[in-house]
Amino acid sequence: MPKIPPINSSQLIKILEKEGFHVIRQKGSHVILINQEKTRIIIPMHPGKDIKPGLLRAILREAGINREKFLQLLKGR
């Protein structure tokens, strides 16, 4: 099973938007997204830094996206 590659926060937001999330607000360096089921995801926005694998896995788990689905969405950019 391939590893999840590190990505930056803007790439992750685009992937989550493909899955039905939309940005509701930004406070400081954190962007808050929500979907139809009212699932709220908080993404740290730090320019020039990638989201570390552990945090990325936790965000994907909260969003209900498995590894295979994430890799498909990442390839389909």
Image (cartoon, rainbow, N blue to C red):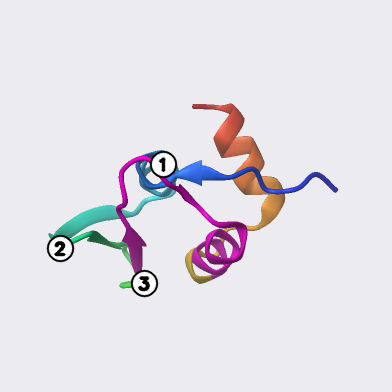
Q: To which residue does mark 2 refer? A: 28
Residue furthest toward the right? 1
**Dot 1 amino acid type:** Lys
Residue 38 locus on image (x, y percent) = 31, 72
Quarter of the view holding residue 74: top right
Residue that mark 1 sits on: 18
Mark closer to the chain start, 2 or 3:
2
Q: SS of the residue at dot 2? A: loop
Is 44 magenta? The answer is yes
Tell me the kind of residue under disc 3.
Answer: Thr
What residue lies at 24% left-to-right and 59% top-to-bottom?
Answer: 31
Q: Quadrant of residue 10?
A: top left
> Is the residue marked by circle 3 packed among few (<14), some (14-19), or many (20+) residues within 10 Å?
few
Q: Nearer the viewer, residue 24 or 7?
A: 7
Q: CA distance from mark 1 to mark 3?
A: 15 Å
**Residue in view at x 31 percent, y 43 percent:** 47
Amino acid type of the residue tagged 2 in the rendering: Gly
Q: Is residue 55 left or right of residue 15?
A: right
Residue 38 is left or right of residue 60, and the answer is: left
Q: Give the x, y percent position of residue 64.
A: 55, 65
Highlighted range, magenta:
41-61
Local SS, label 1: helix
| Residue under label 3 | 39
Q: Nearer the viewer, mark 2 or mark 3?
A: 2
Sequence-wise, the earlier of marks 2 and 1 is 1
**What residue do we see at 44% from left, 48% from top?**
19
Residue nearer the viewer, 75 or 49: 49
Q: Is residue 24 left or right of residue 55?
A: left
Q: Is residue 15 magenta?
A: no
Residue 59: image location, x then y, percent: 49, 65
Residue 70: give x, y in percent of width and height.
Answer: 60, 46
Work out whether mark 1 precedes mark 3 in sequence or the reverse, and give the earlier one.
1
